[in-house]
């Protein structure tokens, strides 16, 4: 076949979707228990939204966005992340005035044109949360503990490490950028070409460079943690104090600056063992200046996003087995098939799944398929059953058979599945 999916895009086939449904269902339960409510936002937005929020001199905006001009002549972009859209929706729908304190979550696909590899796709999926309206350190602590508890719910706490940092306020950051730039100038010729460019455009990103050589060269670069103002230091100390109080382990990583422009104060990453180079499963931080940057009033806020593909790689697929029907229909003759189709609808209406082959295969082949399906019961409709208005119910785990009147089938099966085989 000539038509193939695009590089970095994936099909999630029926054997994989149980794991995805499991991730989604569990995440929803945890998030909703903390009072977060779901928002569903557009996949396509005005390109200017991402340019203004994520920042021009970032990897995402410089080279990773799927941007095109639509037939109306507008520049539009497939969302590379969720925060920009969430803040846009918050402002556009008047939350800043009507309900400034809001806890939101979202799940869905994001698009970035980067080099595909294990744990890195061009269409990937995130679960994200945004906590709007609180500048207090308690909000940072809520979001961090929520992130931790989300992964704990999947049984992953032993394999994770939380790293946190503070970027201070925009004044701190501006001053630090000057100091850092001056320091990096001295290393310029030894850094990679990307980092040489970053010294001029966005020096913070040099600290983010994944190349070992650049990391070594910058290991004794001035640290932002030591350059933040007393108010921001106090905020960070309070966040740590709350985390210490609840026994949530973390490491302060003064090099972690995050790739996006909009962060201030607390930033964090959750790292996992066993994912190779793509070891960040979730990341986030505070972005108190973003609403204003998008033309709204100031709105203190923070959030995180986790990568569902990477979460999925950490999980045991057995945690989410494929669905098994309760029963499997075995029929002989066209009238029996028609009756089975009708009874199947009645079972389905009561939430009971039953499988059937739609081709008139031999009785024996159908019985074999019933055994293989994992269903607990075979529901047999042959000449005798058709003549007497009954169904023969065979318990496939014991081999026992009983004859049940068609009108009693549902209550019979309900009674049987309420008791273990
Ligand atoms: P990385 O350092 O791995 O590129 P990032 O800092 O670009 O990550 P964020 O923008 O913070 O990532 O997104 C949050 C999470 O989304 C990441 O921790 C990761 O789990 C996931 N993620 C980001 N980009 C991809 C991708 N291309 N494919 C799969 N998952 C991704
Ligand atoms: Mg990235």
Image: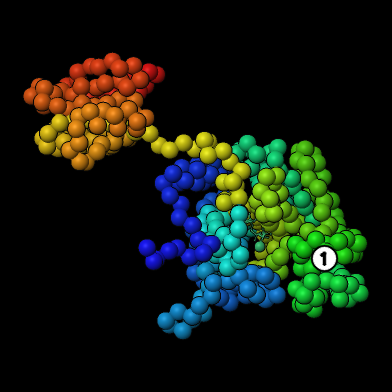
Q: For the view shown, which residue lies furthest in the front direction? A: 1
| x and y, in percent, of residue 292 in the image | 67, 71
Way the structure is coloured: rainbow
Structural crowding at the residue carrying mark 1, measured as other residues with C-alpha within 10 Å and reported as few (<14), some (14–19) or many (≥20) = some
Dot 1 falls on a residue whose secondary structure is helix
Is residue 161 placed above or below 372 in the rendered structure?
below
Q: Quadrant of residue 376?
A: top left
Counting labels gives 1
Going 46% across and 36% down the picture, which residue do you hit? Answer: 321
Residue tagged 1? 214
| x and y, in percent, of residue 280 in the image | 68, 53
Going 75% across and 73% down the picture, which residue do you hit? Answer: 194
Going 90% across and 64% down the picture, which residue do you hit? Answer: 222
Quarter of the rendering occupied by the C terminus? top left
Q: Quadrant of residue 362?
A: top left
| x and y, in percent, of residue 285 in the image | 71, 58
Along the line of sight, the residue nearer the viewer: 8 or 223: 8
Going 66% across and 48% down the picture, which residue do you hit? Answer: 275
Q: For the view shown, which residue lies furthest in the bottom direction? A: 73
Residue 65 shows up from this direction: yes
Quarter of the rendering occupied by the N terminus? bottom left
Along the line of sight, the residue nearer the viewer: 223 or 208: 208
Question: Would residue 305 be found to the left or right of residue 28 on screen?
Answer: right
- State ligand 2's quadrant: bottom right
Question: Would residue 336 be found to the left or right of residue 309 on screen?
Answer: left
Q: Quadrant of residue 353?
A: top left
| x and y, in percent, of residue 9 in the image | 50, 61
Residue 232 shows up from this direction: no
């Amino acid at each position: 076949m000539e038509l193939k999916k695009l590089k970095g895009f994936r099909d999630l086939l029926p054997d994989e979707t149980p794991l995805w449904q499991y991730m989604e269902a569990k995440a929803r339960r945890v998030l909703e228990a903390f009072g977060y409510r779901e928002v569903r936002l557009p996949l396509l937005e005005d390109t200017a939204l991402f340019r203004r929020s994520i920042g021009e001199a970032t990897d995402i905006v410089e080279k990773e966005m799927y941007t095109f001009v639509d037939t109306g002549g507008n520049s539009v972009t497939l969302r590379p992340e969720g925060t920009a859209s969430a803040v846009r929706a918050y402002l556009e729908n008047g939350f800043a005035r009507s309900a400034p304190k809001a806890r939101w979550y979202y799940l869905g696909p994001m698009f970035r044109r980067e080099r595909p590899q294990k744990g890195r796709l061009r269409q990937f999926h995130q679960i994200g949360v945004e906590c709007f309206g609180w500048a207090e350190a308690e909000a940072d602590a809520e979001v961090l503990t929520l992130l931790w508890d989300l992964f704990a719910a999947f049984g992953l706490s032993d394999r994770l490490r939380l790293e946190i940092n503070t970027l201070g306020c925009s004044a701190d950051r501006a001053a630090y950028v000057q100091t850092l730039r001056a320091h990096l100038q001295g290393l310029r010729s030894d850094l990679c070409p990307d980092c040489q460019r970053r010294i001029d455009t966005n020096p913070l990103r040099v600290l983010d460079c994944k190349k070992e050589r650049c990391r070594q060269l910058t290991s004794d670069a001035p640290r932002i943690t030591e350059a933040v103002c007393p108010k921001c230091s106090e905020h960070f100390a309070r966040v740590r104090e709350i985390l210490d109080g609840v026994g949530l382990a973390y490491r302060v990583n003064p090099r972690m600056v995050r790739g996006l422009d909009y962060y201030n104060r607390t930033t964090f990453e959750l790292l996992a063992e066993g994912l190779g180079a793509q070891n960040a499963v979730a990341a986030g931080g505070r972005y108190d200046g973003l609403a204003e940057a998008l033309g709204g009033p100031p709105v203190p806020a923070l959030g995180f996003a986790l990568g569902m593909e990477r979460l999925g790689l950490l999980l045991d697929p057995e945690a989410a087995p494929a669905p098994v029907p309760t029963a499997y229909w075995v029929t002989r003759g066209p009238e029996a098939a028609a009756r089975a189709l009708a009874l199947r609808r009645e079972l389905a209406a009561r939430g009971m799944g039953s499988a059937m082959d739609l081709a008139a295969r031999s009785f024996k082949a159908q019985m074999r398929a019933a055994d293989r399906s994992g269903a607990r019961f075979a529901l047999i409709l042959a000449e005798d059953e058709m003549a007497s208005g009954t169904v023969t119910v065979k318990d496939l785990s014991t081999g026992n058979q009983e004859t049940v009147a068609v009108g009693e089938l549902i209550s019979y099966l309900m009674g049987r599945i309420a008791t273990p085989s």
